[in-house]
Amino acid sequence: MTAHTRLTAGLDTALYFLRNACLFVASICLVVLIASFGWLVFGRYVLNATPTWVEQLSLLLVGYITFLGAAAGIHDDGHLGVTFLRDGFGPRFSSVLRSISDLAMTGFGLVMFTASTELVRFGWSSQLPMLNLPEGMRAIPAAICGLLAALFCGTRALRRMLGDRPATDAFILENI
């Protein structure tokens, strides 16, 4: 195995780990969301005391589930896209269009990261109602998603420009 291959395999493994971390945290948030709604129903209909914090917690958790899941989808190149035009051309032109798309997504991710980081800072001094958590926590998953989108798409575009093919999950799992 050459040094270049080891380096790209290590990078692929690190990016795959980040993707799995996103899915793990999003999955935990989903379980907590489902459990909190179970508690809401139990509290409302059995205890006759509705827990009012569930709505605010669910709004917070949905943001984490959505943005972290989106980041994982970007890594897997499974995000929404209109590809019929790109795929209708030959492989060479299709590769150029894929690189342009990845570079555009990299730029979008950086803008999203910058704007979301500003939202985190702006909202950190106020509190979420009923949860006593900083309001800025709502924007943290958007910042993470933007940074990871830039990282995943930028890496994919760079590898394509260098003549490497982005790794598949099977290749990554072989080299862990």
Image: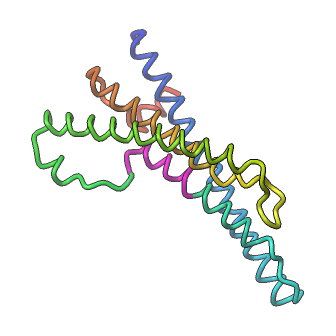
User: What is the count of numbered marks?
Assistant: 0
Q: Residue at x 55, y 53 (%)?
A: 67
Place residue 54 in its image quadrant.
bottom right
Position of residue 108 relative to residue 1, above or below, is below
Give x and y (percent) for residue 28: 68, 55
| Of residues 61 and 122, the one drawn nearer to the viewer in this rendering | 122
Q: Is residue 43 above or below residue 31?
A: below
In the rendered image, residue 87, in percent from the top left (x then y), is placed at: 17, 48
Predominant SS along the magenta part: helix
- Side of 33 where 176 appears, left or right: left
Image quarter hosting the N terminus: top left
- Give left or right: position of 76 versus 123: left
Magenta region, residue range: 66-78
Q: What residue sits 54% from the left and 29% below the top?
A: 14
Nearest the eye: 176 or 119? 119
Q: Where residue 125 sits: x, y (%)?
A: 78, 49
The answer to whether 72 appears left or right of 80 in the picture is right
56 falls in the magenta region: no
Q: Residue at x 81, y 76 (%)?
A: 52
Location of residue 125 with respect to 4 vertically, above or below:
below
